[in-house]
Image (cartoon, rainbow, N blue to C red):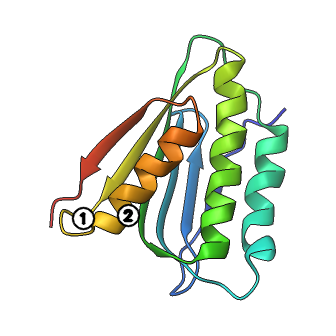
Amino acid sequence: MTTKNLKIEATRQTPGIHFDCKAGVFHIFGQSYPEDTNEVYRPIFEWLSDFEPEQGKQYIVKINMKYYNTASSKKLFELLRAFNKLYRDNYLFTVQWCYNKEDEDILESGKYFEDLTELPFEYIVNMQ
């Protein structure tokens, strides 16, 4: 079981990851178009495999991506599936899907992911 936070700084091609156990916030942000998505996302899945949520605690999965490629989209879906499994085990998770007002593609991606999971989604327009 892990209670350690996970913090990976964003680069031009990789997302920032801030998972704060105490606050219950899992934040992924920036862009994701690395050459090797497995290498980039491996630490996230390793961390999640050790994570044990607390019953009754509300967790927020905040996704604020400006751009991601197809390979990264698959990894985001894998990540949402992992949170969905916890949600199905009666842990409280909500996805906050953030997008820029003019970026319909990112909004539609969020709706697509929502349709593929049982997780509750909230859509948040980024303030410019």
Tell me if 73 is positioned left or right of 12 in this view. right
Judged left or right of residue 124, residue 43 is right
On the image, which quarter does residue 117 sit in?
top right
Q: In the rendered view, tell whether residue 36 sits above or below residue 52.
A: below
Disc 2/disc 1 C-alpha distance (Å)? 8 Å
The quarter of the image holding the N terminus is: top right
Task: Return the disc, 2 or 1, that comes first in the chain's sequence.
Answer: 1
Picture layout, residue 38 above or below residue 35: above
Q: Which quarter shows the C terminus?
A: bottom left
Image coordinates of residue 77 in percent, x first then y, are: 64, 53
Residue 5 location (% of width, % of height): 66, 47
Amino acid, disc 2: Ile
Query: Mark 1: few, some, or many residues within 10 Å (few <14, many ≥20)?
Result: some
Q: Residue at x 72, y 43 (%)?
A: 4
As drawn, the label of residue 100 is 1
The residue beneath circle 2 is 106
- Residue 15 lies, with reference to residue 122, above or below; the image says below
Front residue of this view, candidates 95 and 107: 107
Q: Nearer the viewer, residue 50 or 112?
A: 112
Secondary structure at badge 1 equals loop
Q: Is residue 29 left or right of residue 46?
A: left
Relative vertical location of residue 107 with respect to residue 88 in this rendering, above or below: below
Secondary structure, mark 2, is helix
Residue 46: mark: none
- Residue pictured at 69% horizontal, 42% vertical: 81
